Amino acid sequence: MSLSLVIHAADEWADAVAAALTDRLRAEPRLRVCLPTGETPAPLYAALVRQADADLWSQATVVLLDDYVGLSTDDQAAGGPRLRREIVDHVHPASFIDIDQSGDLETAVQRLDAAAIGLDLAIVGLGLNGHIGFNEPGSTADSSTRVVDLHPRSQEAAEGYGTEGAPERGITIGLARLLEAGDLWLLVTGERKAEILSRALEGPEASDVPASFLRRHATLRVVADEPAASLLASR
Ligand code: F6R
């Protein structure tokens, strides 16, 4: 494991991560990156939209990390529409690979998994329950891209995002594919994430905290703000 831990002041976090991603895109314009939705990346996306030069994303491919199953496209919590609203529609990547649920779910899983092969960079957030994407507690390092039953805390989070659909299932890139990505950035902000971040990085590697398996990635970069990092012994 060669984990790098980068900590920024809370009010500088979004601009700092946006600058790092912008540098990466300048160096590697054809970047293939998966992106999460949620509260953590929202300010990052706003900063990226502010900072992006017209052509920055024009050769890049963006893959949606995960989504709820069965939400209507106008549901506030639906991941694909949210990612479009917050970043994709503003920066115009060459390709945006959404999770298309218009056919059967097995086909959607196969398409998502194919899109997740060969990611240059996987960017993920950390759930309060230790999940990564919708790799919920009980997931292992070899978990595949799949449809999952949502953990109660993930259902609560969907309510917090304003869902009207009470989703019970999610579809997610599996931990195994995320661990194959060229680079992996774990984004974590806010004091409420401090305890789960310390368990993920400094507790035992175990399936009750799926994020703990990210430590197996050769170049994991954890980008936290001060409040989220406040309980880390290694900071
Ligand atoms: C969303 C996703 C989730 C979130 C996690 C943190 O696409 O993959 O794993 O990253 O639940 O959510 P926030 O950022 O809202 O605290």
Image: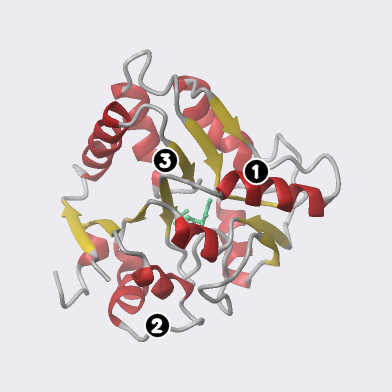
Find out if the beta carbon at label 3 lies less than 8 Å from the nearest ligand 1 atom.
yes
Q: Quadrant of the N terminus?
A: bottom left
What is the number of the mark on residue 205? 2
The spot of residue 5 in percent (x, y) is 20, 61
State the separation of the CA atoms marked 2 and 1.
31 Å
What is the number of the mark on residue 78? 1
Q: Determine the residue positioned at 51% across, 35% down.
A: 62
Q: Secondary structure at mark 2?
A: loop
Q: Determine the residue positioned at 29% across, 59% down.
A: 219
Q: Determine the residue positioned at 77% across, 43% down.
A: 101
Q: Quadrant of the C terminus?
A: bottom left
What is the number of the mark on residue 42? 3
Type of residue at label 1? Answer: Ala
Seen from the viewer's position, the closer of residues 196 and 185 is: 185
The spot of residue 150 in percent (x, y) is 66, 67
Indicate which disc, 2 or 1, sits on the residue closer to the N terminus.
1
What is the number of the mark on residue 108? none
Type of residue at label 2? Answer: Glu
Q: Secondary structure at mark 3?
A: helix
Of circles 2 and 1, which is in front? 2
State the separation of the CA atoms marked 3 and 1.
14 Å
Residue 77 shows up from this direction? no
96 is higher (above) or lower (below) than 111? above
Type of residue at label 3? Answer: Ala
Seen from the viewer's position, the closer of residues 184 and 14 is: 184
Residue 165 shows up from this direction? yes
Left or right: 229 with respect to 164? left
The spot of residue 108 in percent (x, y) is 75, 47
